[in-house]
Image (tube, rainbow, N blue to C red):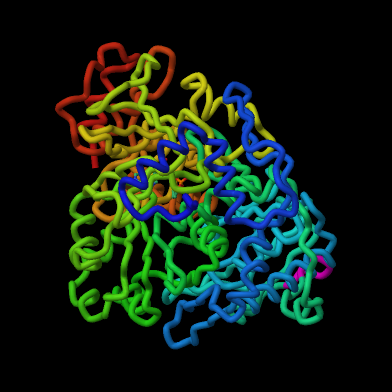
Amino acid sequence: MSNYHIKHLEEYYQVYRKSVREPENFWGEVAEEHFLWRKKWDNVLSWDFKKPEVKWFEGAQLNITENCIDRHLLTRGEKTAIIFEPNNPEEETEHITYNQLHQRVCQMANVLKDQGVKKGDRVCIYLPMIPELSIALLACARIGAIHSVVFAGFSSTALATRINDSDCKIVITADGSYRGSKTIDLKGIVDEGLVDCPGVKNVLVVKRTQAEINMKEGRDQWLQPLLDKAYLDCVPEIMNAEDPLFILYTSGSTGKPKGMVHTTAGYLVYTAYTFKNVFQYTENDVYWCTADIGWITGHSYIVYGPLANGATTLMFEGVPSYPDFGRFWEIVEKHKVNQFYTAPTAIRALAKQNISFAEEHDLSSLKVLGSVGEPINEEAWHWYNDIIGKKNSPIVDTWWQTETGGIMITPIPFVTPTKPTYATLPFIGIQPALMDDQGKELKGNQVEGRLCIKFPWPGMARTIWGNHDRYKDTYFSAYPNKYFSGDGALRDEVGYYRITGRVDDVIIVSGHNLGTAPIEDAINEHPAVAESAIVGFPHDIKGNALYGYVILKETGESRKHDNLRKEINQIITEHIGPIAKLDKIQFTSGLPKTRSGKIMRRILRKIASRDMNNLGDTSTLLNPEVVEDIKDNVL
Ligand code: WT7
């Protein structure tokens, strides 16, 4: 018997019921049948959401890279594990077989060992989308080091904050990176960041752009010569089920980024099992997820999930618009991609282009289309479905988060009937709950509330690095005994879920999760700024864009507002990265505040969205008069 690959709706319901009624038996069977264990577990699950503490497969021992690589070598050694498609279409594609991947991961693991990296040490990886990035993750996992990937679009300050938070002693980076027609001085950003990271003793540099860079004596080394000398095999470190595998930072509504900690066994089982079912992957398929490995989507569904299934996973270095807006479709045609997983912001940008970009290419290989990162609007859904999928390829609108490790609410293609803008049904093992304002669970269908999860799943993050209290406060305090996602959702008449968006101060811009507080902190560093507030407003392509309300210290008419706007965005770029830049900046004399001094963002959001008729009761504000002023000067 196997619950591993679901193929019919009745099977879904049957397996779902089992996963909820007997979660330990269910996950125990999945784990037993489909993975390689050095030692079996003593206990499938122990949990307490009050502490919170969750342990899956306690007592088990394994190495995730044996599951993702070694165990495939006998049957799939010459199969392509990774297809690397470079930024420049003229440059040659690389096909890395499982045998080659094994060797390259082992060599990189040996280099890390030679550099003194040990089990449990944190390794910061700041690389573009090149094969070395996937290999670096796996090399860390091979020796039990904890990887902390920082998206290579983040600024030097953001990089430094993340390096220091988890106390990384070593950074793996590249001389530069390509993004469309641009070349980015990645190493320069690292050098700048490391000024504030006295703990980093060691920087390994991949050669990618051949740019002239500065190599700091005693700290920086080129990676390739070290790899060339490294031994071709590396005995995997045997890890406990709950040993940390990686840290990945996500923004919160307040304060510094949260280093979500994912552990080994549960993450492996969950990402592998979701990958298999959500994409209906079969042996000779070519699968492509366009995300960057700097985000959780790339960790779970470019690297670990696909490789655990012995899949062929495509990595693309570039952007959808280079050399033109046909690039994605050219790649689909060239590699006969079967499963394609992207974000609504990319779909919207591509849908705006001339239809010939898509129609020029043979997209008939496509079987499943995926969407992730933010709610997909109806128009984008239909374009994706009609123009790309030719109404033949089901769209899986997958809801999940950095914190959940893997996909949580999603259709299973060819199994669950899809419905535009609905993530549809909970994945196997997932028990969602919608909560009302009073903290009561909303039972039955046709209800709308805050989305929680009532029961642990193997892929969930276990803590925030160095701050378990914050983990508890953020996710387990709003509703006792439940994980709170921060999202709102509704459940329709047949029990399908539709995600309605964040209910906290996190704004999703082009699928990137941005907290308001860190952006406001950055703006407030500008010497002319007294106070600021950021809200989101609807944007055609990005989904949401950022609108900033800024109070200046002196309000002289003579100030050059446009210059200030540039400087403010410059500071944001330095502190966080270009993704957090504000589209609109309104200078104002005040911000609407409650009597306890809290900014009423609800009002600011409505004004920024030009939804001014219905601002609600403003009479309880400390300073109701400022609302009129802000309305009059809206941009
Ligand atoms: C937030 C998590 C997990 C992959 C990428 C984002 C939003 C994600 C969907 C979807 C509606 C979605 C939620 C969530 N989100 N997928 N299919 N429909 N909203 O990971 O950066 O941790 O962001 O992205 O608001 O809470 P992340």
Nearest the camera: 152 or 326? 326
- Write the residue at 70% across / 76% down: 103
Q: Tell me where residue 350 appears, x and y as whole percent.
A: 27, 66
Answer with the quarter of the image where residue 616 lies: top left
Q: Is residue 606 magenta?
A: no
Decide: is 431 above or below 370: above
Q: Tell me where residue 228 appears, x and y as whole percent.
A: 77, 82
Q: Is residue 218 magenta?
A: yes
Q: Main secondary structure of the magenta part?
A: loop
Q: Is residue 415 left or right of residue 552?
A: left
Q: Tell me where residue 474 appears, x and y as whole percent.
A: 53, 29
Residue lying furthest left: 613
Nearest the camera: 60 or 207? 60
Q: Is residue 629 left or right of residue 580?
A: left
Visible residue check, residue 599: yes
| Magenta segment | 215-220
Visible residue check, residue 557: no
- Write the residue at 39% across / 24% down: 599
Answer with the quarter of the image where residue 231 lies: bottom right
Image-quarter location of ligand 1: top left
